[in-house]
Amino acid sequence: MNSSFNHSLYYLNTLIETSSDAITIINTAGEVQYWSSQAEKMYGISLQEIKNKKISHFFNKEDLKLIEILETKVPVFNIYHQPRPDKHVLISSSPIFDENGELIGAISIDQDITNIVKLNEKLTLTNSQLQKIKQQYQIQEQIGPLAEIKGNSATIQNAKNLAVKVAKTDATVLIQGESGVGKELFAQGIHDASFRKNQPFIPINCGAIPEALFESELFGYEKGSFTGAYKEGKAGKVEMADGGTLFLDEIGMLPLEMQVKLLRVLQEREVFRIGGNASIKVNIRVVAATNSDLKDMVKKGLFREDLYYRLNVVTLEIPPLRKRINDIPILVENFAQEFSAKYQKEMPTLLESAMEVFTNHHWPGNIRELRNVVERMIIFIDKSTIHAEDVMSIFPVEVNEIIVKEGLAQEKALLEKDRIEQVLTETYRNKSAAAKKLGISRVSLYKKLKQYNIDM
């Protein structure tokens, strides 16, 4: 029995140490009983320093969720928390009871999301700065708000014309298109072409925010709602967009609970910060984007029907790159100029065969993929003239193999066509004699004559 108990301790210890999250256990006196190696790394406090000492000696008492759990005896799961000004975590915490139901301590599991929060804040600041630079550049150069979207094909011109037309209104816009087609560029263009162009353009990627952070990111929070930094409270993205445009990218990733709250914002044009009772009026224009089939998601119960119809006032379909092949040379030249300047290299000349490699590719990643390939080309190919094999060399291996196979298939077809025409000439266009000489049936010969568009 004792051996079995000892084994259980080893099992438990290994389980805790295998976790990538910080795990802390305290007793009812607030003294640390367990402090995992991940907790040591996350907070820079060794087990020797903190073991059997009150956790409040190392953290401000008001910043400790564990102490709160001892008092409330109610577990919490995936709650956003700041135990220190420099640490952002998702915390799950529970009281610990013995076999008699007596409280003996509490445990917390902290997932470090500091980098995610800082990157998100940095992205917001960068987008704000970029918007100001773009506006100044457009004023100086007297260029249109959608000038960054290159291409002369009818499909992209139709999309740009509709974007400019809807920009002059205040209607909610739903931008649909595959990943990488440039949905955010269109959203920014709609904002820049609107009467709100001198007000904020606030983007938020619904697919890049942990679920527990959605509410605070969108609506903000009042003083005292969260422990740690920003004790005076913080405005959410909706509030920050007041007077301007709120861009909700990947709207299909928004949790159902948040969809209800977003719908209320769209209907009432007001927000409530977390922990606040007073409504804050907002004057915003909403542009949403998705690469998901929202109508299908509505049928499956994954997206609210009322929110879908509220967003779907005007739908803007952005065509994939494979439906605007004629634009590829323009885009390649544009990106090549951009990256040649960025990396201080001579702008290369692309032979027609090299450009054909670009135009023959399927581009599942659309503009984003094309841009990345051109950047690799400029970085790795140090030639003034670029050939087809140079371009093929910078494609990923699996893509390169597809291109080679397609090229071989085309070459084989050309050889077969030449051979059939040669035999037809030799047999004075006698189909039976030609089929016999080629070693195929007369029916097969007729099929190939039709396939290769050879005169019968």
Image (cartoon, helix red, strand yellow):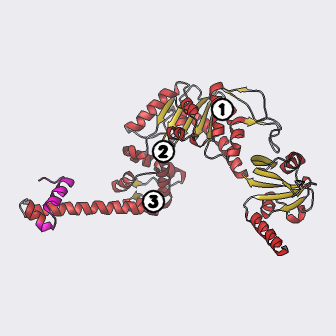
Q: Amino acid at mark 1?
A: Ala
Q: Which marked residue is nearer to the observer: mark 2 or mark 1?
A: 2
Q: Residue at x 45, y 30 (%)?
A: 162
Q: Residue at x 86, y 64 (%)?
A: 47
**Residue 437 colored in magenta in the image:** yes
- Towards the viewer: 259 or 385: 259
Label 2 packing within 10 angstroms: few (<14), some (14-19), many (20+): some
Residue 173 placement (x, y as % from top left): 53, 31
Q: Amino acid at mark 3?
A: Phe
Q: Which span of residues is magenta-colored?
A: 436-456
Q: CA distance from mark 3 to mark 1?
A: 40 Å
- Towards the viewer: 385 or 313: 313
Query: Which mark, residue 241?
Result: 1
Vertical side of 57 occupied by 154: above or below: above
- Towards the viewer: 84 or 20: 20
Q: Which residue is mark 3?
A: 395
Residue 156 placement (x, y as % from top left): 42, 38
